[in-house]
Image (cartoon, rainbow, N blue to C red):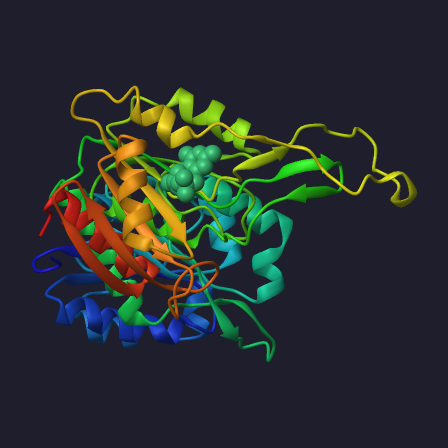
Amino acid sequence: MLSGKRILLGVTGGIAAYKAAFLLREFQKAGAEVRVAMTPSATRFVGAETFSSLSRHPVAVDIFPDSSDSGDSWTRHIQWGEWADLFVIAPCTANTLAKIVHGLADNMLTSTVLAARCPILICPTMDGEMYQAPATRKNLEQAHNLGYHVLEPEEGYLASGLEGKGRLPEPQQILQYSTELISSVYTGGVLAGKTVLVTAGPTREHIDPVRFISNPSTGKMGFAMAEAARQLGAEVILIHGPVQLSPPAGMETIEIETAQQLFEAVKTYADADIVIMSAAVADFSPSEYHEQKVKKEQAESEIKLTSTPDILSWLGHKKRDGQVLIGFAMETENLLENASRKLNEKNIDWIVANSLTEPGAGFAVDTNAVLLLGNSRQEQLSGSKKELAREILDLIFNSK
Ligand code: C5P
């Protein structure tokens, strides 16, 4: 997919700048032509000559080229912005991220971001505390809102000697992400032009302001489904309950807390071409909500419950022609039987059934083992949640 593609690699001033040299090689091995723009502080970590030798092209640092950049002019950021099919900024420091989301153009790299006509992938890389700092969180959110693609950093050992989230993902992973990005943008993808509504994570049904009924869903599977749909070119709306995950890049995200709020949000997008209900919706909610925290001494030993609306069933019974509805089911017994009953009763097209008793499947873990059940098809699948999400969509939409 990268063969013949032109990638502009932006390198900023973090210790992970050295990894950008390996990334450049990966891009080249995949057939891409690469040019490099560095911030002035990046050159303190790795010499520009390293990148110019590897890319066989002068490296741009300042807006005003020096005499060695023959043939280039001070409008080089415009030319490079037009030239690139993809702009990957790896590593991207907190400082450059902040500049990008505020539209600053004080060096070649940030100016080219403004001039670029291609998708831009930001790989934020920094110390864990800097990554968690409120300003960085806000800037990342803004980056998502502005349509930049963001590849989250990894957890692990950091140059500061501390452990945390902020490591640049390995070059192979950035390569893979870039390839997917390019394929969804430039080939259209099998879901191009489609609107996909995905729900993810748990709901919380409050008893009083501090107590609620919920489940251990982390939203991982639903977020993976949303990302996979986006990679296939869909316009994705992700509605999710309380989770610890950062919102995936390139989609609208809506946060809800209760099943009723989820229902209201789903209604707004109920005519989406495809709906993927991966949320672990609480089936019951307390009949009575106490405005104040219930005192231990006053607590009753029984809580009366009311059923929450079955959102998927509501969608299934008003399904329009051509709409595809995909549900999830979490079972502890009789997987196939229960899943096929739900498929029929809810009037949906596909159900992804998890058995909670299967090792490596279910809540919180990164892997899953599922039974994908359609009206005339049945597939047993397993793997990481990200792989599975892609496989499920590939099977349903014949995108392979
Ligand atoms: O019937 P059961 O709750 O097992 O079905 C699970 C599927 O139904 C999931 O796709 C879930 O998102 C959806 N669901 C729903 N509304 C509920 C409960 C579950 O849409 N109240």
Quadrant hosting residue 144: top left
The residue sitting at 51% across, 48% down in the picture is: 98
Farthest bottom residue in view: 161
**In this picture, residue 95 sits left or right of residue 392:** right
338 relative to 39, above or below: above
284 or 172, nearer to the observer: 284
69 relative to 19, above or below: above
311 or 387, nearer to the observer: 311
Q: Quarter of the image containing the N terminus?
A: bottom left
Residue 350 screen position, x and y as percent: 24, 41
| Residue 66 visible, this orientation | no
Residue 239 screen position, x and y as percent: 44, 36
35 or 232, nearer to the observer: 232
Query: Quarter containing ligand 1?
Result: top left
**In this picture, residue 219 sits left or right of residue 31:** right
| Residue 343 visible, this orientation | yes
Quadrant hosting residue 233: top left
**In this picture, residue 48 sits left or right of residue 307:** left
Residue 185 screen position, x and y as percent: 19, 43
159 relative to 378, above or below: below
Residue 294 screen position, x and y as percent: 84, 38
The residue sitting at 37% across, 31% down in the picture is: 312
